[in-house]
Amino acid sequence: MTEEREPERTADGRYVLVRGRRWRATDPALPEEVARRLRHHLMAARRAVGAALRAEDAAAERAARERVGIAKRALGERGEPPWWEQDTAARERRWEEGLRALDESG
């Protein structure tokens, strides 16, 4: 069994470093239950992208990639302004709207 490690972060905590590449970190203000649900949606959407690619279904691929984007924005890993420039209300609104959209889309 492999041990799961947290990725290295930049000193300001805004980015994680994976194999020398910098990626925006998940918003640390996310409640754990919300973050868990968003990660679940993200992984399901990524699996749907793969299935659509294998099936050569362009419409399903577009829909799945849109769900990936919604999840990534809700997690704070994409979008403008970045989470560290948003006030508390904007951050909460971002993840609540993202979660609502993903729950409604299946």
Image (spheres, helix red, strand yellow):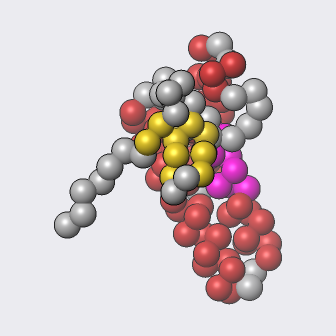
- Magenta residues span 66-74
Which percent across, then down, holds residue 36? 42, 43
Magenta segment main secondary structure: helix
In the image, residue 91 lies in the stretch drawn in magenta = no
* Total marks in image: 0
Q: Residue furthest front?
A: 20
Left or right: residue 98 versus residue 29 is: right
Query: Furthest residue to the left?
Result: 1
Residue 34 visible in the picture: yes
In percent of the image, x 65 and y 13: which residue is there?
87
Query: In x, y percent, where is residue 62?
Result: 77, 66
Up the image or down, 76 lies above or below 101; here it is above
Q: Quadrant of residue 15?
A: top right
| Residue under the point 59% across and 61% down | 45
**Is residue 68 a member of the stretch shown in magenta?**
yes
In the image, 102 versus 26, the foreground residue is 26
Q: Residue, x 65% and y 85% (percent of image)?
A: 54
Residue plotted at (67% across, 77% down): 52
In the rendering, at what x and y percent does residue 67 appear? 67, 54
Quarter of the image with the C terminus is bottom right
Rendered-image quadrant of the N terminus: bottom left
Q: Position of residue 37 (x, y in %)?
A: 46, 44
